[in-house]
Image (cartoon, rainbow, N blue to C red):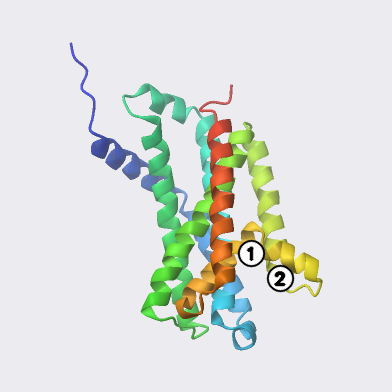
Amino acid sequence: MESSIPKISTVLKTLLRSDFTTQWRNRRAVILTLIVPIIILTTWKPFVAQLGGPFVLSNSITIGLVAIGLMGYSTSIARDRDKGIFQRLRVAPISSWSIMTSRLLVQMAMILMVTTAVFIAGSSYDQVTLTPAGYIVTYLTAVVGGALYLSIGQMIVGRIQNPETVNSTVRLVYFVFIMVGMFGQFSTNAELHNIVHWSPYGTVKTILASGMEPAKWDNDASMALLVTLGYTIVCAVLGIKWFKWNTK
């Protein structure tokens, strides 16, 4: 008796439906992911006149991307791995890459959602609007920046097996990124400012801010983009290398 192997499109459609349903059931976490960038956006309104709209919007989006990659993606992967969901999926006649592709596509949808929410809030509350090209380039840079934080989350969940340890680790890393990234850029210490500028937080914020004003894209933004891609490749390679489908 021959076993029928489902088409890749059918498998992905089924996995996406399941993953989006799970995301909807965890909508409280989704709401929290959306709220934090909006809070930063509204509380930093005075900086719009001083430092410009792109500065405030880019920081808000970056914070949302950090939350998606660390608090969302890595914790969900660690939880499902601990429950044996991945093991059961791998028994089915589907490829491993399709399982992870579905998860990543859901997170990409979250990235677009957070970016859109910040745009809407920025336009309605801070009166910050961009050109059509600015919106398009910012969406693209948000995907690039989001990929970096997803790769960092993958690296953490690949290196650490225990879901509780993963949860505590990503919370600590999230806190460090937010505190150092947000407030380090205001430091008068040139060395600290330079470190923050070329950190994962700083490079993502730079390409987002530059993407909002494509006409002002300069060499610094291009270097930040290259560094962001470099961070992403290194973290993704390590995350894939270390990742195990079960906790044993």
Mark 2–mark 1 CB contact (< 8 Å): yes
Give the residue at x 39% y 41%.
101
* Badge 1 amino acid: Gly
Is disc 2 surrounded by few (<14), some (14 to 19) or many (20+) residues within 10 Å? some
- The number of discs equals 2
Looking at the image, which residue sits at the far top? Answer: 1
Quarter location, residue 44: bottom right
Local SS, label 1: helix
In the rendered image, residue 57, in percent from the top left (x then y), is placed at 54, 74
Give the residue at x 22% y 18%.
3
Looking at the image, which residue sits at the far left? Answer: 1
In the rendered image, residue 167, in percent from the top left (x then y), is placed at 64, 43
The answer to whether one can see residue 36 in this image is no
Looking at the image, which residue sits at the far bottom? Answer: 49
Local SS, label 2: loop
Task: Locate the N terminus and report the quarter of the image it occupies.
Answer: top left
Q: Which residue is mark 1?
A: 202
Mark 2 to mark 1 CA distance (whole Å)? 8 Å
Give the residue at x 68% y 44%.
169
* Badge 2 amino acid: Gln
Give the residue at x 55% y 42%.
154
The answer to which of marks 2 and 1 sits earlier in the sequence is 2
Is disc 1 surrounded by few (<14), some (14 to 19) or many (20+) residues within 10 Å? many
| Residue closer to the observer: 145 or 19 | 145
Quarter location, residue 242: top right
Task: Locate the C terminus and report the quarter of the image it occupies.
Answer: top right
Q: Which residue is mark 2?
A: 185
The answer to whether one can see residue 213 in this image is yes
Looking at the image, which residue sits at the far right? Answer: 189
Q: Is residue 29 above or below residue 121?
A: above
In the image: residue 228, left or right of residue 99: right
In the rendered image, residue 83, in percent from the top left (x then y), is placed at 51, 30
